[in-house]
Amino acid sequence: MSIIILCYNKSKNLAGSFHNCYGKKTAENILHSLPDDSSCDEILKELAFARMIDRGLNDSKNNKTISNEEMKQKIKQWQK
């Protein structure tokens, strides 16, 4: 099953197709969407962001989520 997402970057939006994995073609699409003068750090940030989105969508699809209230409680525990 394909999941279509929009990967944000500063220059434009890129529609990427994920097939339950983060592949070479997706990375290539992201690279081509970036300006030619992008730094290595900018490229890595975009690739990491796309991966995080993919993982989050997969978690959501597989019901591996928590409620907002549960998250609020976790944050309160971290702040102690």
Image (cartoon, helix red, strand yellow):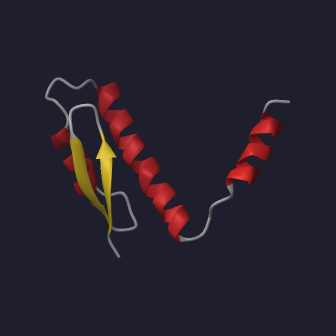
Residue 6 higher or lower than 20, as above or below: above
**Left or right, residue 79 beside residue 1:** right
The number of numbered badges drawn on the structure is 0
| Frontmost residue, 52 versus 80 | 80
**Left or right, residue 44 beside residue 34:** right
Residue 58 is situated, as x and y percent measured from the top left of the image, at: 49, 64
| Frontmost residue, 50 versus 67 | 67
Q: What residue is drawn where x is 46% and y is 48%?
A: 52
| Frontmost residue, 48 versus 74 | 74
Quarter containing the N terminus: bottom left
Q: Quadrant of residue 26?
A: bottom left
Q: What residue is drawn where x is 62% and y is 65%?
A: 64
- Farthest residue to the front: give it: 69
Q: Quadrant of residue 41?
A: top left
**Left or right, residue 9 beside residue 50:** left
Residue 76 higher or lower than 1, as above or below: above
- Farthest residue to the bottom: give it: 1
Residue 43 is situated, as x and y percent measured from the top left of the image, at: 30, 33
Residue 34 is situated, as x and y percent measured from the top left of the image, at: 20, 35
Quarter containing the C terminus: top right
Residue 39 is situated, as x and y percent measured from the top left of the image, at: 26, 23
Q: What residue is drawn where x is 41% and y is 49%?
A: 51
